[in-house]
Image: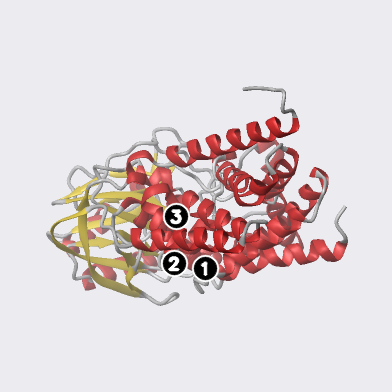
Amino acid sequence: MQKPAGLVLLAAFGAASVFSFAPLYLGALMPLSLAGWLWGISRTRTARGALLAGYAWGLGYFVANVYWIYISLHTFGGMPGWMAAGCVVLFGAYLALFPALAAYLGRRLPCPEPLRLPLLLPTLFCATEWLRGTLFTGFPWAEIGTSQIPAWPLAGYAPVLGSYGVGWLLQAGTGLLLAQWRAPLRWAAVTALWLAGWGLLHVEWTTPVGRPVNVSLAQSNIAQDMKWDAAHYVDNLRVNLQQVQRAKGDIIVLPETAIPAFLSDVPPWYLDTLRSAAGRRALVLGVPLQGKAANEYYNGAMVLTDPGQPVYKKQHLVPFGEFVPVPWLFGWMYRFLDMPLSGFSRGAVKQAPFVIGPTRLAANICYEDVFGSEIAQALPEATMLVNFSNLAWFDGSWAAEQQLQMSQARALETGRYMLRSTNTGATAIVDAQGRVQARLPQRQRAILEGQAVNRTGLTPYGRWQNTPILLIWLLVTLSLVCAGIRRQHPSKSF
């Protein structure tokens, strides 16, 4: 059993990871944080001790990286402070089960000891990270691979293996440096890994098409406590109109739920006024959409200026924000939360991009851009990506900056520009290499004017998504376990 001081130290190693993500982008800190996880497990001799070590590290990691949930629950959701803080800890405690499971299996499964640190433990860690991003609709926030994007050398592997693959190589390199191998061999292998990644950063996987497109991305900066207040409804509509009138781009984008009412309830004259202000330009905006049934409604986006009014309906909803999983267990939260439209329906998994001249614009809303494989499903049809967000729920935290970094990961994985129009930030234009070309300061009402380029073609990740890395993990794990069994029982054959 680990001593309390050791467990606190492991939690501190996990918490330090928050500085490796945006807005600081100190990606070099992530290997140090991961080294703490590996070190904690290497000091144990039992699977139970490894489980506890992995859990302590994970608790520090996730509480530090999702602390901003407190703001949405308490400040805007109306939950008492003590209860909101407790929910953050409970959520972190749930998420910590995944690195704990990896630690337990990493000590329990048979494996040649020289390969346990550099291969088995990193593979199990990343496999459980994928499981965290999949189970119960998934919550892949703060993937370790995202910390290396866009400029650290291992980011070059993102268009090939995705952010999960980047994380695996990062963890494997860290484990290799800690392994009991000859120092020249360890350093040579890690140096080669990073140099190859740096080389891949300079590969242009997709092809630009046509002239750059002038885009205008609106940042409304409407306070969350005013956005859904009926007393401010007309003022909010006025803000939208003023921003459309000031916009100069050929494609104008307004953020998530820019119109804080069902489209069917908005006065037709106002919609006509918006279309008139846009003129011949395309106006794309976020708006709730009413379904056929009374309790059927969607978090949506649409091209208002297209006579056919094509829509996108958000298909990956936020647990506890847009729907409550396992209502019989968590339904009590509705008694404390004051969140409008918190029972959304899901849109279809596969939806066609918006057709705007030569641009095929694939929409995603809020934290849908956290899911790399789902964003890649819009390819090859999509020539550009657009995200509509309202992160005023977490105002004053690093959540908006962290999500911007995840959008950078999606742009790099797919080889597509990502446009981001948000209510309070971070509104930005991200190029196909995952670099922020232009952005607005947070919590300012403004319009980001810039250019984006349509691109065609497929990156390896865009073609196969997570399938290659999942197969690699499966083969590595099976090979190591079989090799471990052979060492334990030399007479057995496979």
Secondary structure beneath label 3? helix
- Which one is in front, 59 or 91? 59
Q: Quadrant of residue 274?
A: bottom left
Above or below: residue 486 compared with residue 10? above
Q: Position of residue 30 (x, y in %)?
A: 58, 65
The kind of residue tagged 1 is Gly
Mark 1 vs mark 3, CA separation in Å? 24 Å
Residue behind mark 1 = 27
Position of residue 399 measured from the top left corner of the image (x, y, whole percent) = 53, 65
- Direction from residue 228 to residue 386 in the image, left or right: left
SS at circle 1: loop
Mark 3–mark 2 distance (CA, rounded to whole Å): 26 Å
- Callout 1 touching callout 3 (CB < 8 Å): no
Viewer-proximal residue, 405 or 189?
Answer: 189
Image coords of residue 284 (percent x, y): 27, 55
Res. 16 in view: yes
Q: Amino acid at mark 2?
A: Trp
Q: Residue at x 55, y 57 (%)?
A: 173
Task: Please give the residue where the numbered disc 3 appears in the rendered image.
Answer: 366
Question: Which residue is found at the position 43% from the left and 49% from the top?
Answer: 162
Visible residue check, residue 79: no
Q: Do the residues under discs 2 and 1 have CB atoms within 8 angstroms?
A: yes
Marks 3 and 2 close (CB-CB < 8 Å): no
When the figure is inspected, residue 223 is found, relative to residue 109, above or below; the finding is below
> Considering only order in the chain, which callout, 2 or 3, is on the residue closer to the N terminus?
2
Secondary structure under the numbered disc 2 in the rendered image:
loop
Nearer-the-camera pick, 467 or 420 = 467
